[in-house]
Image (cartoon, helix red, strand yellow):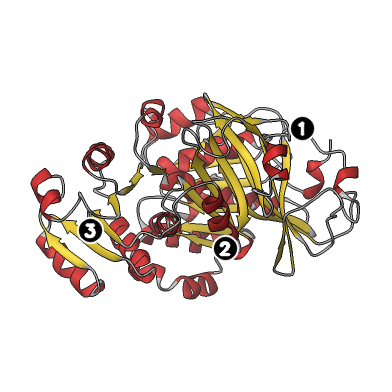
Amino acid sequence: MFKKKDAEKSGMNIIIVGCGKVGATLIEQLTQEGHDITIIDLNSKKIEAITNTYDAMGVVGNGASYSTQLEAGIEKADLFIAVTNSDELNLLCCTVAKRAGSLAAIARVRTPDYIKEVDYFSEKLGLAMIINPDFVSSRVMARILTLPTALNVTSFAHGRVNLVRIEIPDDNVLCNRNIAEIGRDGITERTVICAIERDGNVFIPSGEFIIKAGDIVSFAAAQKESRVFLKKIGFKTNQVKSCIIVGGGRAGYYAADQLLKAGMDVRIIEIDQARCERLSELLPDATIIHADGTDEEVLKEEGIEDVGAFIPLTGIDEENVLLSLHAKHVSKAKVITRITRNNFKEVITELDLGSVIYPKYITSDAIIAYVRAKNNSKDSNIETLYPMLDSRAEAIEFKVEKESEVVNVPLFKLSLKKDLLIAFINRNGKIIIPKGQDSIQVGDSVMIVTTHTGFNDIQDILA
C-alpha cells in the first residue's frame, strides 16, 4: 500500500477504483474538499504518481478482489466509486463492495446495451448512481444545438431553468452598459446575469459592473425566457436543423440518438464498414456514410459548407481539434468539440473551437455533487452542482427542507458572502428570478453562483 496522509479529515472515507482520467480528476477534487481517499489500480506507477501528488492512499491490485478491497478499508468506507475502462469490471467491483461494506456505490457504465438497463442495475445491485459520460455529454450537445449561438447550456430545476454562456460581440446592445442600467431598461426582467469572464478572470457582477465586447456572459433564465433574452440582445435563437457527426463510436451513437430525438437531420461519417452497418440498424433515421471523415473532399461532398452543426467525435483529440478548425474555416456551422484529455488546455482555450465539452469533467462533476449531498445534512442538500469556467466558479442548486437563518428573510436583509449571487428560486415548479423583497421558503430549490468552492449547505451563502 502506498500511503500519503496529512492530518485527520472531517469528510467521508471514499474508495476509487481506476486511475484513469476520471479517477485522477475525482481524486484532485475530493482531496481538496477534505475527504479521505484510497485509490485502487493494477498499475503501480499510476498509484505512486497519484499518492506522490495528492493526499491519498493507494493500493495496487484488482478492484473487484475482496482481499484488495479489505486492504483498502472497505469495511469503514462510506462511498465506493468504480471508474475503470471496463463496464463489467465496474459493476463487479460495486457488487463486491456492497457485499463487503455498508456503503453507497457508483459505477461508470458506457455500453449502450447496459445504459438501457440502468434502473435494473440500480435496483438489483443497489447502486447509488450509474453514470455514462458519453450519454450525458450527448444531452449537453443537444441542449447547445437548441440555442446554437450559446457556447454552453446547462439545465437546472429538472430542466425548467437554463444556465447559458454567450460571448458578447462588438456593438451589442449590452456593450459599455452596467448591469443596473440594463435591468432598468427591462432587458433582464426575467433573467439574471450570473458571471462574466474577461481576460482570464471571473467576476460575479454587481449592479455597477460594465459589460464590454468580448466578455463571456453566463445568464440564468427559465427555459422559454432564455430565447426571449437572446432575442432582446440580438442573438439568433433558431434551433439547428442539420448536423454532421464524424465518428460512429459510442460518443457518435449517443449524440446522433439525442439529436434525432430533437428533430434534427443527422449524418454520421464512419470509416469502419461493419460499424456503419451496425449504426444503420441502431439509428434507422440517421444517414450513415461509409467514408473517411478526416478527408476534406469527403466533408465537402457531404455538405459541411451548408450544414447547421458539425461535431467531430473521432476518439482522437488532435483530429477533433483539426476538424473543428477546418469546419470553422469553411462553414458557418455551429461547432462542438469533444476533448477527452487535459493536455495543452491553455492552448485549446485560445483556439476557436466553438463549444468545448470535456466528458471527464461532466462525469466527475456529477459524482462530486452526489458526494457533497451525501456528506451534507439529511435535511438540506445539493440537488445539482455545476463547476463553471474551469472550476473557477460554481453554480449550485440547494433543496431547502428545514428552517434556518436564510429562510423567511427578505433577500436584501441577508448578509451574503462577496462574489455570490442568488440566480433563481424554484417554488413548486414556479421559477422566481429574485428581487430584494423575495425570500427563501422551506420547500424551495435555490440556485446560487459563486467563485467560492466547497459549499455544502444553503447557509454557506451567509458571510
Q: Is residue 297 visible?
A: yes
Residue labelled with disc 1: 418
Label 3 sits on residue: 248
- State left or right for residue 195 relative to residue 47: right
Residue 357 percent location from the top left of the image: 41, 45
- Residues at marks 3 and 2 touching, judged by CB atoms closer than 8 Å: no
Viewer-closest of 436 and 338: 436
For residue 402, what is the image quadrant? bottom right
Q: Earlier in the sequence, mark 1 or mark 3?
A: 3
Q: Residues within 10 Å of mark 3 (few under 14, many from 20)?
A: many
Q: Amino acid at mark 2?
A: Lys
Lower position in the chain sequence, tag 3 or tag 2: 2
User: Can you identify the residue that label 2 sits on?
Assistant: 224
Instruction: Name above or below for residue 42 compared with residue 348.
Output: below
Query: Residue 424 placed where, x, y %?
Result: 71, 54
**Which is in the foreground here, disc 1 or disc 2?**
2
User: Could you give the CA–CA distance between mark 1 and mark 2, rounded to whole angstroms?
Assistant: 30 Å
Give the camera-side residue of 369 and 297. 297
Residue contact between numbered discs 1 and 2, judged by CB atoms under 8 Å: no
